Image: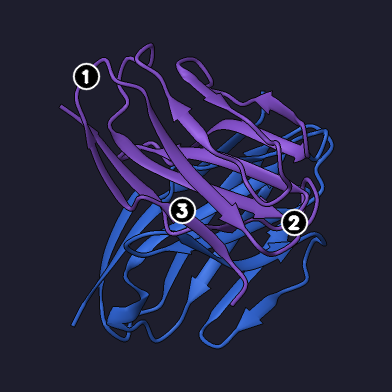
Chain colours: A blue, B purple
Amino acid sequence: EDKVVQSPLSLVVHEGDTVTLNCSYEVTNFRSLLWYKQEKKAPTFLFMLTSSGIEKKSGRLSSILDKKELFSILNITATQTGDSAVYLCAVPNFGNEKLTFGTGTRLTIIP
Amino acid sequence: DGGITQSPKYLFRKEGQNVTLSCEQNLNHDAMYWYRQDPGQGLRLIYYSQIVNDFQKGDIAEGYSVSREKKESFPLTVTSAQKNPTAFYLCASSIFSGNTIYFGEGSWLTVV
């Protein structure tokens, strides 16, 4: 059975700090890994990672994948209160039919 | 505007009643999904559909039913057989299976 584990489960930091969120996975026939940000309602898509070692970047957010060690990290630099959210990591299953999600990391930024 | 519309956003029902949550998308996506989210448990897949008139059970399908008669629509019925139906329900779609999925705004169901 496919498995996605995120850590930490929750994180509280001060505005301006840099944070690193972790996602490890066990999946048959890996294809890609996705990161989502969920504030009050629907998760919004952040990144899709398919290749090892290639960083994807969007503003203060960046993410990288390590297919040898089976994990990905999501970095957020110079955090702002608007970064407070649950960050979800997900991988498609073997048949590429559905996504398995981790439990998420709840990030809280204190002003 | 293109997107995924879920309704209602908030729904209260008495125990023992069936309830249907609507999900409509105008993105021309083939695949649609229903997830349930409980605190501290992430998203769990209820049902998914890769194409019209076809759907498969996800990880927690018991007590739920779906239909996919039109490409745009994937309604979810929460039946009285679902033991703990109070949750946040998210509908999603993707161009095709395994591609990036996009979510609707969600429906909060409370059963009293």
Rendered position, A36 above or below B72 = below
Q: Which mark identifies residue B29?
A: 2
Local packing at callout 1 (Cα closer than 10 Å; few below 14, some 14-19, many 20+) is some
Q: How many marks?
A: 3
Residue B57 in percent (x, y) is at 64, 23
Instruction: Give the residue at mark 3.
Output: B6
B91 relative position to A97: left or right: left
Local packing at callout 3 (Cα closer than 10 Å; few below 14, some 14-19, many 20+) is many
Rendered position, B89 above or below A86 = above
Residue A70 in percent (x, y) is at 70, 45
Chain ID for label 2? Answer: B
Q: Residue at x 59, y 77 (%)?
A: B1
Marks 2 and 1, how far apart at CA: 34 Å
Helix, strand or loop at disc 2?
loop
Instruction: Give the residue at mark 1.
Output: B15
* Amino acid at the residue labelled 1: Glu
